[in-house]
Amino acid sequence: MDEFKVIVVMNEAMLKLLKDKNVNYEKNLKIKKCLEDETIFFRISKLDAYKILQNVGVKQEKLEDVYKKLTSPNVFYGLLNRGKIKSDDDTIIIKYNEYSSDNLFKKIN
């Protein structure tokens, strides 16, 4: 399951709910704009990520698990392979080692 897409859908649902209840939904509109960037969770602090997750409806006890899934090495490498993240991008604060296929099969002495 793509956690990022789930967060996008949760935010859309929260926007609709808040609109229907005539409650201020300005934060969720800002979150919607932020979520246009798939790399957002690699560019912001953990605290800011938690604020976004709470505003879209992630329960307190699930914050850490969801955050870890959103910023996992697999997600990072997927974004890297699709060109969404560049290895030399200074705005990325969560990075993982980049592996070159040339180095993967070298004999270690």
Image (cartoon, grey):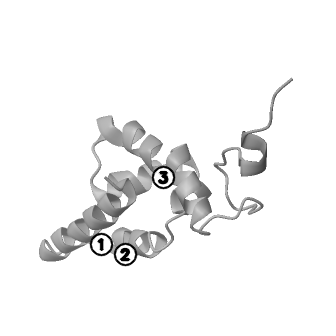
Mark 3 element type: helix
User: What percent of the width, then of the height, locates residue 36?
Assistant: 46, 74
User: What percent of the width, then of the height, locates residue 15?
Assistant: 25, 72
Tell me what residue is drawn at x 79 percent, y 37 percent: 106
Q: Would residue 100 be visible to someone looking at this image?
A: no
Q: Would residue 3 be visible to someone looking at this image?
A: yes
Q: Nearer the viewer, residue 104 or 36?
A: 104
Mark 2 element type: helix
The quarter of the picture where residue 85 lies is bottom right
Mark 1 element type: loop
Q: Check contact, mark 2 vs mark 3: CB within 8 A.
A: no
Q: Check contact, mark 2 vs mark 1: CB within 8 A.
A: yes
Tell me what residue is drawn at x 35 percent, y 56 percent: 2
Q: Amino acid at mark 2?
A: Leu
Question: How many C-alpha atoms fall within 10 Å of the one at disc 3: few (<14), some, or many (≥20)?
Answer: some
Above or below for 17 versus 41: below
Q: Is residue 66 left or right of 47 when viewed as pictured?
A: left
| Residue pointed to by mark 3 | 49
Q: Nearer the viewer, residue 58 or 86?
A: 86
| Residue pointed to by mark 1 | 25
- Cα separation between marks 2 and 3: 15 Å
For marks 2 and 3 on the same chain, the one whose residue lies earlier in the sequence: 2
Q: Amino acid at mark 1?
A: Tyr
| Residue pointed to by mark 2 | 29
Q: Nearer the viewer, residue 99 or 15?
A: 99
Question: How many C-alpha atoms fall within 10 Å of the one at disc 1: few (<14), some, or many (≥20)?
Answer: some
| Picture quarter with the C terminus | top right
Question: How many C-alpha atoms fall within 10 Å of the one at disc 2: few (<14), some, or many (≥20)?
Answer: some
**Which one is in front in this view, the residue at disc 2 or the one at disc 1?**
2
Q: Is residue 16 left or right of 41 when viewed as pictured?
A: left
The quarter of the picture where residue 3 lies is bottom left
Q: Amino acid at mark 3?
A: Ala
